[in-house]
Image (spheres, rainbow, N blue to C red):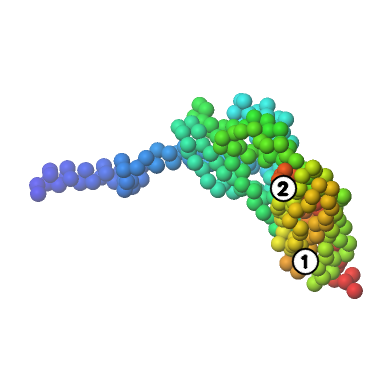
C-alpha cells in the first residue's frame, strides 16, 4: 500500500471515530424496528407524568393544573383534591401519534398501616409537542377515583348503599402486645332486596375479617367483626393507632369506611 493510500485510509478511520464520539455507537438494529422513534415521545411523557404527580404530592394544585388540557382544567377545579403520599409509573402505552395511556400506582392507607396500592389509569394527549393530562367528564359517582379514566367511558351504574352501619368508628381502648382485640360494627340491610358484604378492603395485614353470613334479607341485621393483632406491627413506646377498612356492599356497590382506634401503651404502662 502506497503512502498516499495509507493516509486516505487513516483519514476515513479518524472521521468514523469522530462520528462515534459525537453520536454514540452505531445502533445494532438500525432500520429494523419502529420502537426507536417512540422512545423520545415516551421519555418526554414519563417526565411529564412525574412532574404532575410531584405537584399532587406537594398539594400544588395551581401548578398541577398547567399539566392538564384546556378542557380538563375546569373539571379539575371542581374535584375534591387530596395529596398523594407517593407514586410509581407502572406502564406507558403510546396508542396513537398524539395519544397515550399511563398506569400509575399510588399508596392508599392510614397511619401505622401497611400501604396497599391503587392503580390509576390516566389518558394523555400530545398538543404542540407537549404532553397534557386529559381528564374524563365529571362523574356523578362520588366514589370514583380522581384520575381513573375508563378506556371506553360509559354512564356508571347507580351506587346503592344497602348496608347501613350503626357506627363507623370503634374504640379498641388499650391494646396490649400478644392480645387480639375485636371490633364489632352492627349493620342493617335497608334495601328492598337481599344484600351481602361483597368485599372488605384492608390496609394492614394486622386486620382479619371474621366469617360473615353470605346474604341478608331486607330488614335483617348483622355484625361485621374485625380482629386486630398487634404482633405484626413494630411499635415502640406509647402509640395511638387509627386503622381503616372499606366495606363494599353487594350487589349495589356502596362503599362505607370504618375506623378502628386504640392506644398501645408504653412498656412501663403494660402491667
Residue that carries the numbered disc 2 in the rendered image: 250
Q: In percent of the image, x 64 and y 51: which residue is there?
A: 117
The quadrant in which residue 36 appears is: top left
Q: In percent of the image, x 67 and y 50: which residue is there?
A: 107
Circle 1 packing at 10 Å, graded few (<14), some (14-19), many (20+), is some
Q: Is residue 252 left or right of residue 6?
A: right
Q: State whether residue 93 appears in this view.
A: yes
Identify the element where label 1 is drawn: loop
Circle 2 packing at 10 Å, graded few (<14), some (14-19), many (20+), is some
Q: Quadrant of the C terminus?
A: bottom right
Q: Is residue 122 left or right of residue 238?
A: left
Residue 238 at x, y percent in the picture: 84, 64
Q: Nearer the viewer, residue 45 or 118?
A: 118
Q: Nearer the viewer, residue 254 or 131?
A: 254
Q: Is residue 21 above or below residue 151?
A: below
Q: Nearer the viewer, residue 70 or 172?
A: 172
Q: Which mark is residue 113?
A: none
Residue that carries the numbered disc 1 in the rendered image: 229
Badge 2 or badge 1: first in the primary sequence: 1
Q: Is residue 145 above or below residue 261?
A: above
Residue 50 at x, y percent in the picture: 58, 42
Q: Is residue 3 left or right of residue 96?
A: left
Amino acid at each position: 500500500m502506497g503512502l498516499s493510500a495509507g493516509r486516505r485510509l487513516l483519514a476515513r478511520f479518524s472521521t468514523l471515530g469522530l462520528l462515534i464520539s459525537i453520536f454514540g455507537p452505531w445502533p445494532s438494529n438500525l432500520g429494523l424496528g419502529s420502537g426507536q422513534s417512540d422512545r423520545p415521545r415516551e421519555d418526554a411523557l414519563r417526565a411529564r407524568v412525574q412532574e404532575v404527580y410531584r405537584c399532587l404530592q406537594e398539594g400544588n394544585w395551581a401548578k398541577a393544573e398547567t399539566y392538564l388540557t384546556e378542557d380538563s382544567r375546569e373539571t379539575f377545579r371542581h374535584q375534591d383534591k387530596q395529596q398523594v403520599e407517593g407514586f410509581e409509573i407502572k406502564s406507558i402505552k403510546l396508542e396513537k401519534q398524539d395519544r397515550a395511556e399511563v398506569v400509575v400506582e399510588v399508596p392508599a392507607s392510614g397511619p401505622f398501616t401497611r400501604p396497599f396500592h391503587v392503580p390509576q389509569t390516566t389518558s394523555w394527549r400530545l398538543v404542540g409537542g407537549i404532553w397534557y393530562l386529559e381528564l374524563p367528564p365529571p362523574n356523578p359517582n362520588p366514589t370514583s377515583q380522581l384520575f381513573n379514566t375508563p378506556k371506553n367511558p360509559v354512564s356508571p351504574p347507580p351506587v346503592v348503599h344497602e348496608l347501613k352501619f350503626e357506627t363507623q368508628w370503634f374504640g379498641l381502648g388499650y391494646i396490649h402486645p400478644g392480645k387480639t382485640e375485636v371490633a364489632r360494627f352492627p349493620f342493617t340491610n335497608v334495601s328492598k332486596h337481599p344484600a351481602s358484604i361483597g368485599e372488605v378492603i384492608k390496609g394492614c395485614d394486622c386486620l382479619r375479617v371474621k366469617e360473615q353470613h353470605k346474604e341478608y334479607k331486607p330488614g335483617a341485621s348483622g355484625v361485621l367483626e374485625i380482629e386486630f393483632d398487634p404482633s405484626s406491627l413494630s411499635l415502640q413506646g406509647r402509640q395511638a393507632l387509627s386503622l381503616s377498612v372499606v366495606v363494599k356492599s353487594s350487589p349495589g356497590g356502596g362503599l362505607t369506611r370504618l375506623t378502628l382506634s386504640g392506644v398501645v401503651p408504653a412498656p412501663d404502662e403494660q402491667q
